[in-house]
Image: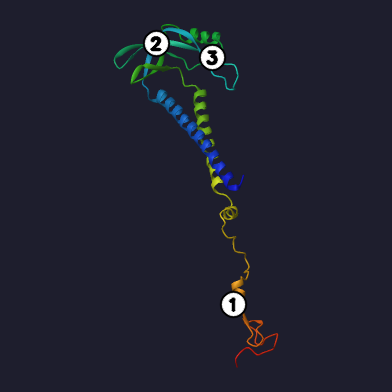
């Protein structure tokens, strides 16, 4: 593979890195924005627990061929007022437990029927609710996605720069351009011809600076 093909391959590879990086960056921004909207913009209301159950959540494995991960979360139904109307809606807690027993214990300890809890609801759809407190893991995940997107995009831009900025000498050689001028002058054939003349007596080439022909000793300069 020549240098030109190598440069094209670097540029093609950089496009993939940039696309993945920008995709992660956008996903991180969307996640962070959604967290901000839910916990800072959605109105809050006083929710009264009607009933609660334990919900099983199946998470995809991180490695290919790995076993799926089972998590459990309390799912609570609340009675609350929003915009002058009463609603009943349910949502899963942001708290996740590794076992059913831990989730059931949290349900019985914190979310007994009749207990009051602050909830947040979507003003466009009051039945869309969230409750509990924002988890540090959600913030950390959004932050890691943002940082990962920026890092991958930066790597892609760096690879693209390397693909475009090939050494000047290699680029000139590939395009058939003349080599750079050396620091000392090299006389060409034309310059040599201009610095010589022929002796009118013997016809031998003589330097133009010579006063006499070194071959026949004829005086060359006019008096």
Q: Which mark is residue 167?
A: none
Q: Is residue 98 above or below residue 10?
A: above
Query: Could you tell me how many numbered marks the image carries?
Result: 3
Left or right: residue 57 versus residue 2 is left
Q: What's the CA distance linking mark 1 and mark 2?
A: 103 Å
Residue designated by label 1:
194
Q: Earlier in the sequence, mark 3 or mark 2?
A: 3
Image vertical order of residue 140 relative to residue 190, above or below: above
User: Residue 203 at what x, y percent from top left?
Assistant: 65, 84
Element at label 1:
helix
Picture quadrant where residue 215 is located: bottom right
Identify the element where label 2 is drawn.
Answer: strand
Left or right of 7 on screen, residue 22: left
- Identify the residue at image location x=37%, y=22%: 42
* Residue at the (54%, 36%) spot, across then down: 152
Q: Residue furthest bottom?
A: 223
Task: Tell me where residue 192 appears, x and y as whole percent.
Answer: 62, 75
> Disc 3 marks which residue?
71
Classed neighbour count for the residue bearing mark 1: other residues with Cα under 10 Å, few (<14), some (14–19), many (≥20): few
The extreme left residue here reads: 84
Residue 158 appears in the rendering: no
Label 2 sits on residue: 78
Q: Residues within 10 Å of mark 3 (few under 14, many from 20)?
A: some
Quadrant for the C terminus, please.
bottom right
Which of the image's four quarters has the N terminus? top right
Please provide percent x and percent y for residue 214: 70, 85
């Amino acid at each position: 593979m020549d240098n030109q093909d190598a440069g094209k391959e670097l540029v093609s590879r950089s496009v993939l890195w940039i696309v993945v990086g920008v995709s992660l960056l956008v996903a991180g921004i969307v996640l962070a924005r959604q967290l901000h909207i839910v916990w800072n913009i959605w109105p809050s209301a006083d929710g009264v627990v009607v009933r609660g159950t334990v919900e099983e959540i199946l998470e995809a494995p991180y490695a290919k061929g790995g076993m799926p991960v089972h998590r459990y979360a309390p799912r609570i139904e609340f009675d609350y007022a929003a915009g002058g109307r009463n609603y009943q809606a349910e949502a899963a807690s942001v708290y996740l437990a590794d076992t059913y027993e831990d989730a059931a214990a949290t349900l019985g300890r914190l979310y007994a029927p009749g207990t009051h809890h602050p909830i947040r609801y979507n003003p466009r759809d009051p039945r869309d609710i969230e409750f509990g407190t924002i988890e540090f893991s959600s913030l950390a995940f959004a932050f890691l996605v943002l940082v990962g997107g920026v890092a991958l995009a930066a790597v892609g831009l760096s690879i693209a720069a390397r693909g475009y900025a090939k050494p000047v000498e290699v680029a000139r050689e590939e395009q058939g351009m003349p080599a750079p001028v050396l620091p000392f002058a090299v006389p060409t054939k034309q310059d040599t011809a201009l610095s010589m003349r022929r002796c009118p007596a013997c016809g031998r080439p003589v330097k133009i600076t010579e006063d006499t022909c070194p071959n026949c000793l004829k005086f060359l300069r006019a008096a």
